Amino acid sequence: QHYADSVIDFIRTHELDGFDLDFEPPQLPKQAEFTLIATTLRASLDEAGAEDDKTYLLTVSPSTLNGYSNWATLSEEFDFVNLQTYWGTTLLTQYINAGVPKNKITLGLLSEGATPKLTDIEKKIDLYEANDLAGLFAWRLDTDTLVNGKPTYAFAKEMHIQLDESDSAQAPT
């Protein structure tokens, strides 16, 4: 509960809309511990949201299933499951097969580097549309298409353009 309380303090102090659990090796908790963390955070965020007249999001960004067998029920604690599909799409199949609802799954696009990876954007949009997923996300906009050490956000802009041109996707505003 102490961890959940500190998360609530942090999101209130910084006026954030929620909290994301970055879920990747090497030190992942056991299934029962992670389930307790997720349920405690969800309950605390819901309580804080009622007090603040807001809805606080709880998301998780996994890079692995970690052998957990309860993703179907565990995903109920999260608003979105942001899959770290930066280097491939194996996770998408794994999480769908594990019972995570497609309307909670978002696909991650690698947004670091010198130039936007346009083929990555197009492939992920195709997967997003074909599987009727919740959306896409870009990681690390602070390093999006660096020019002289500063981000130009060319990747995010291209992602927006591609989504806008897509038949079934609705681009963010």
Image (cartoon, rainbow, N blue to C red):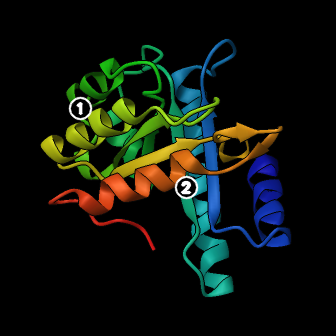
Q: Residue furthest bottom?
A: 53
Residue at image location 76% in from the left, 64% down from the top: 11
Say left or right for 12 vs 77. right
Out of 172 and 133, give the one closest to the viewer: 172
Q: Secondary structure at mark 2?
A: strand
Residue 78 screen position, x and y as percent: 46, 51
User: What is the tally of numbered marks visible in this picture?
Assistant: 2
Q: Quadrant of residue 106?
A: top left
One can see residue 80 in this view: no
Q: Quadrant of residue 127?
A: top left
Residue at image location 58% in from the left, 19% down from the top: 30
Using the image, tell me which numbered label, if any, was put on residue 96: 1
Using the image, tell me which numbered label, if any, was put on residue 58: 2
Give the mark, 2 or 1, whose residue is nearer the N terminus: 2
Q: Quadrant of residue 124?
A: top left
Using the image, tell me which numbered label, if any, was put on residue 38: none
Out of 77 and 140, give the one closest to the viewer: 140
Residue 45 screen position, x and y as percent: 62, 65
Residue 131 screen position, x and y as percent: 16, 42
Out of 135 and 114, give the one closest to the viewer: 114
Q: Do the residues under discs 2 and 1 have CB atoms within 8 angstroms?
A: no
Q: Which residue type carries mark 2?
A: Leu
Residue at image location 46% in from the left, 41% down from the top: 82
Rate crowding at label 1 as few (under 14), some (14 to 19) or many (20 or more) other CA atoms within 10 Å.
some
Residue 126 screen position, x and y as percent: 21, 40
Task: Quote the CA–CA distance across marks 2 and 1.
Answer: 19 Å
Q: Which residue type carries mark 1?
A: Ile
Rate crowding at label 2 as few (under 14), some (14 to 19) or many (20 or more) other CA atoms within 10 Å.
many
Q: Secondary structure at mark 1?
A: helix
